[in-house]
């Protein structure tokens, strides 16, 4: 089997550069969805239900994109067409979603419009994200994979930083951060517009700079035989033969992604309550808290970048994984007790440590244990370990909020408990290496 050649730093950079734009879109979505729907008039106990659609879209779209792109080839490549279509749809929806309350609709109609827009946005973001993970697996040799994923992680966190801070930046330059009842502030609307422009420019850059391997060359580098090529595999068959590590890492993922679902859903309401002392979504204080959520999530992204440098210093991958999750758990629990907006930087920096491990370690452990033939399909299926916990967390979120006294800050404490449980589950993982790995 041929060995893939080393790629220059800039070729590795170009493979992942579009992810910067995609992540801006994802950050805008995750930091502002609860704020948008609360502003439109959603009850806090129902907020988690609005978050069911994104992971539901992901669990359907990512395996299909992975499997389909494993088996197709166009003159533009195998992964890039999916990347481009996903980005294009995301751009269109980003221009519509924040305007859900601005088209003269009733509250109920605006909610439905917002929900449908959110479903299309997350489907499109999922469709655009998945190819970047696969391009590294397809084009980069084992020796350089660590560097390639590090570059990707840097661009992901840099994109998050920009996306989280855009509404605050627009507020600081004088664009209104408050709006009439049932409409979204201009600071948020303009942030989505600029995010959409950056997204399409970044994706166009990657498309023009990256040339994927033709099918024959790909088969030579990945050791795919003619017999294997003809084999028909469905998702059920793939899951039957998946390494055990898929399920054990999946258990850890369950607690991690449920925790972060509650962070995205309840941070705005939680800090508006604990720091600004308000639960009134129409108040200037609530919208100020909404901007501060972007700052806190940016601190989380910075914490994630810094912790990514620390992670390789651990001799044991399991130890680094579990320590990271415990730090994140402490960060979440501390949000209940830190009532100064700046002290919350400590909490979200610690949460960033958990996020850093969640972005890097599960995919490293999994890709080491599977061969290249069905890499796209397996990565798509593995996305289920990200989506299912979010769906479950969203479904039970309203009920749990009642159980913890109706206070959104208590949901962040629950998120911290979940991460600490996940840290214990890390020690159930037994890492394996695939026989067909280059």
Image: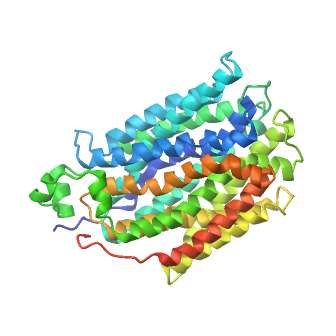
Question: Compared to 199, does 374 lie above or below?
Answer: below
Q: Quadrant of residue 357?
A: bottom right
**429 to 41, vertically: above or below:** below
Compared across the picture, whether 212 is left or right of 94 comes to: left
Task: State the quadrant of the C terminus.
Answer: bottom left
Is 221 on the left or on the right of 117, as rendered? Answer: left
Residue at point 26%, 70% (across, down) = 437
Residue 307 seen in the current view: yes
Residue 139 can be seen in this image? no
Rendering coords of residue 211 (x, y %): 28, 48
- Residue farthest to the left? 226
Image point (62%, 52%), residue name: 261
Residue 350 at x, y = what percent? 69, 67
Answer with left or right where residue 127 lies relative to residue 283: left
Residue found at the far bottom of this picture: 315
Question: Which one is nearer the viewer's eye here, 280 or 21?
Answer: 280
- Give the residue at x 75% y 30%: 41
Type of colouring: rainbow
Task: Write down the quadrant of residue 96 in the picture.
Answer: top right
Residue 69 in percent (x, y) is at: 29, 46
In the depicted view, which residue is nearer to us: 30 or 192?
30
């Amino acid at each position: 089997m041929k060995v893939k050649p080393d790629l220059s730093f800039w070729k590795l950079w170009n493979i992942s550069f579009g992810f910067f734009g995609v992540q801006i879109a994802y950050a805008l979505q995750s930091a502002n969805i609860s704020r948008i729907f609360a502003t439109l008039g959603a009850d806090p106990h129902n907020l988690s239900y609005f978050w069911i659609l994104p992971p539901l879209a992901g669990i359907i779209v990512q395996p299909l994109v992975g499997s389909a792109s494993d088996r197709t080839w166009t003159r533009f490549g195998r992964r890039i067409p999916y990347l481009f279509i996903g980005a294009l749809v995301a751009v269109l929806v980003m221009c519509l979603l924040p305007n859900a309350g601005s088209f003269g609709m009733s509250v109920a109609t605006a909610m439905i419009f917002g929900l449908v827009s959110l479903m299309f946005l997350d489907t499109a973001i999922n469709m655009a994200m998945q190819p970047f993970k696969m391009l590294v697996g397809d084009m980069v040799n084992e020796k350089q994979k660590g560097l390639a994923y590090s570059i990707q992680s840097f661009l992901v966190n840099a994109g998050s930083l920009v996306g989280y801070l855009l509404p605050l930046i627009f507020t600081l330059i004088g664009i209104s951060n408050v709006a009439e009842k049932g409409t979204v502030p201009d600071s948020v609307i303009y942030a989505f517009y600029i995010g959409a422009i950056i997204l399409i420019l970044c994706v166009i850059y990657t498309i023009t700079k990256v040339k994927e391997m033709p099918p024959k060359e790909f088969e030579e580098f990945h050791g795919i035989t003619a017999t294997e090529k003809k084999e028909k595999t469905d998702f059920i068959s793939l899951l039957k033969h998946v390494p055990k590590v898929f399920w054990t890492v999946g258990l850890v993922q369950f607690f991690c992604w449920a925790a972060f679902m509650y962070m995205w859903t309840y941070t705005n309401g939680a800090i508006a309550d604990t720091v600004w002392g308000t639960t009134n979504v129409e108040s200037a204080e609530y919208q100020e808290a909404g901007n501060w959520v972007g700052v806190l999530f940016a601190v989380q992204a910075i914490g994630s970048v810094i912790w990514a440098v620390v992670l390789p210093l651990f001799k044991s991958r399991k130890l680094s994984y579990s320590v990271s999750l415990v730090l994140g758990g402490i960060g979440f629990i501390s949000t209940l007790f830190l009532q100064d907006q700046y002290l919350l930087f400590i909490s979200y920096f610690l949460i960033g440590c958990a996020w850093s491990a969640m972005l890097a370690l599960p995919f490293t452990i999994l890709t080491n244990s599977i061969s290249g033939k069905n890499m796209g399909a397996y990565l798509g299926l593995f996305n289920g370990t990200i989506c299912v916990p979010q769906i479950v967390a969203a479904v039970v979120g309203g009920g749990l909020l009642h159980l913890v006294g109706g206070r959104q800050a208590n949901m962040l404490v629950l998120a911290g408990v979940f991460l600490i449980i996940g840290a214990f589950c890390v020690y159930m993982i037994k890492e394996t290496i695939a026989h067909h790995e280059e």
